[in-house]
Amino acid sequence: MKRDINPKKQAAGQERRRKPDQFPLLLDISRTIAAFETLNEILETLVEITTRELKADRGTIFLNDSETGELYSRVAQGNFHREIRILNDSGVAGHVFTTGEGVIVNDACADPRFNRDIDEETGYLTKSILCVPIRTVKGELIGVAQVLNKKTGTFTAKDRKLLEAMTTQAAIALQSTQFVERMKRFRAKEMEFFDIVSEVTAEIDLGALLQKVMSEATRMLGAERATLFLNDEKTGELFSKIGLGLAATEIRMPNHIGIAGAVFTSRQTINIPYAYADLRFNPAFDTKTGFFTRSILCVPVINKNGKIIGVTQVLNKRGDPFTQEDESRLKAFTAQVSIALENAKLFDDVQNMKNYSESMLESMSNGVITINEDGKIVTCNAAGLQILRIAPEEVLRRNAGDFFTGENGWIMEKIRHVEGSGKPDIIMDAEAAFGGYRISVNLTTLPLISTAGQKLGLMIVIDDITSEKRMKSTMSRYMDPGLADRLLGEGEEILGGKSADATILFSDIRGFTTLAEELGAQGTVSLLNEYFTIMVDCIRKEGGMLDKFIGDAIMAAFGIPIAHEDDEDRAVRAAIGMIRALQVWNRRRIEEGKKPVGMGIGLNTDTIVSGNIGSPKRMDYTLIGDGVNLASRLESLCKQYHASILISENTFRRLKGTYRIREVDRVQVKGKTQNVGVYEVLDYHTEETYPNLMDVVNQFRDGLALYRRREWERAIGRFEEGLRLNPEEKLCRMYIERCAFFREAPPGDDWDGGWVIKNK
């Protein structure tokens, strides 16, 4: 007799019969995984088993990184493994991890949680997804397992349970191996940390030590840049040294400014994951350097006595913000090297003092000789060797009594007198004989005494005041010291002229006639004396030669009588320095209720003729040539182009340094038939004196290009945008007027974009 069978009971019976079938599989997973020692092998094997058993096309095991808040997996590529990381709350995998519930997505493209970017990047088409959480037997969630695109049919609840069972079976092995891997990585980091500290603390040179610390901090934290700032207690500044040897550059800033200053004053670590979202971050540094700062970690450097001696700042951890572990490691690292830093800083201070003393002695025009307590000559600087006309081996380590004899015996008497009295002795305009020459000297003998009152010896200062030096002192008041040196050294051989490449500088006071009328004779002379003193210092600081004063104008040259490889740069730096010095002087004048003074500067590089012109009884050293005239024309053009510094294309092309410069026009000056490119130097400006400078420069450059292509309307648009960025931009306003003029009266076909200057 046929018996009816209940379908629900039949399905339940089949389910009970299937469950024991999973036991061999799960047991096989346990045995297989137990044979592996590395996380990579376990992940690779588990993916292979889950993909095969669920008849899926692909599979991935993601484990959670609690430190970074990410899910990560490893993908084999040849002999290497590539790590994939995603945020543990993004995508389908992130949803499963955060909710702890498995999901089946049979139409991936229709699910809002699905990230289509991955398929677009890899070229793989995801149709269906089965994703479950990975839990230990205790219920701890450690990751997710995901399989894609079932080969036949769709993923079912049975598939989900099977995947959950397989991953639970492997969870302990995954968690254990993950822990072992973390411990190995931690131990490797610690060993590396001790090696780094040992290597770094062995360095005594401050510059090299700073470089090592910054290099190791960058590498240790996986950052793009690192800077270690030490505090200079004398100046209240944080400083660092970038580069080594002659290329070393020192950075200084007040120790309360910026992120570094905030850390130094508060002694608290600052960790900024998104720099531009933090109001304490100053983006001006990025604008100036072209570097883009994403994240910042800055920690105080504290010595063993609890005193803060500086800060360490690292920028842009690759891929992620800086973590709590990064903070701890950087603090530990800086604490370990703080003693080495203090020792190196002390050594650097002592070395700087020694170098300063030696440099000071060597740069002095006076001869300096030191004698120790045993009466032996220990040092003699370069000027002393020159005055005495001897080689170092002829004087050093000799007894002073054996050296200062004969006609110079009176010097030995002064030495004995000072030894006995312990007081300085000075003799003026005395005669001495060295190397067969008689010289006039001022001689000062000083006792050397330590801070403890112990006698260390004597120091003799010899000032050569022969007729040559007296003449030079007088002549230097009326001409450049370099030219005076040549006249004294070469005599009549300097007469005549010669050609040389030089950069000529012309400067002129704006509205001087009106100013002179208001000040009167005495006031005008007083103003010019003060003004010329400031300007000449700027020129001589860069090695320039002052040629002459022409009323209120200054004419100077760079490259004569002594040429340098960077005379053009020296001239530009001098011009920038002159404008900046003028700004400082004007602020002082305004505070005193006086009118500010304006100035224009023109620079041109060319071959010029230099020499003495006149008669044998009265000569004048001067510079002549077209190159000189063009520099003068450029100074005059400053008024027309509303500029403070204009340079020719001849100078611009030879510059070796980087400056903020824009081309303003191609002009045909009076007396010339060819156009000359004219450029404006803008480096003296600040954000206060010229807001949005580089943005305006870019708009002006584009507008100038359109102007030369006769696209008047588009050019006007660019110039108007420049005016919007800086309403005081007079050059843009001038070009708008030019474009309007040419729009109504277009230039001829032979127009090359230049402008003819009819006046001088």
Image (cartoon, rainbow, N blue to C red):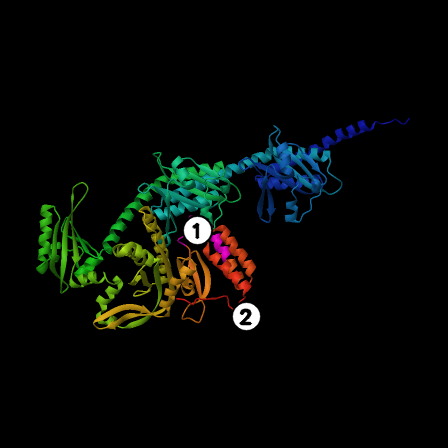
Q: In the image, is 629 to the left or to the right of 745? A: left
- Which residue position holds label 2? 749
Label located before the other in sequence (1 or 2) = 1
Which residues are the magenta region?
683-700
Q: Quarter of the image holding residue 640?
A: bottom left
Residue at left 39%, top 47%?
211
Check the image and report above or below for 128 versus 543: above
Q: Which residue is mark 1?
A: 690
* Amino acid type shown at disc 1: Tyr
Q: Position of residue 22 (x, y in %)?
A: 70, 33
| Viewer-closest of 703 and 55 | 703
Residue 182 image offset from top left, x and y in percent = 52, 37
597 on left or right of 707: left
Does dot 1 land on a helix, a strand or a loop?
loop
Q: Is disc 2 surrounded by few (<14), some (14 to 19) or many (20+) residues within 10 Å?
A: few
Q: Is the residue 445 above or below the residue 501 in the image? A: above
The single residue placed furthest to the right in the displayed view is: 1
**Residue 30 in view (yes/no):** no
Does 684 appear in magenta? yes
Q: Is residue 445 magenta?
A: no
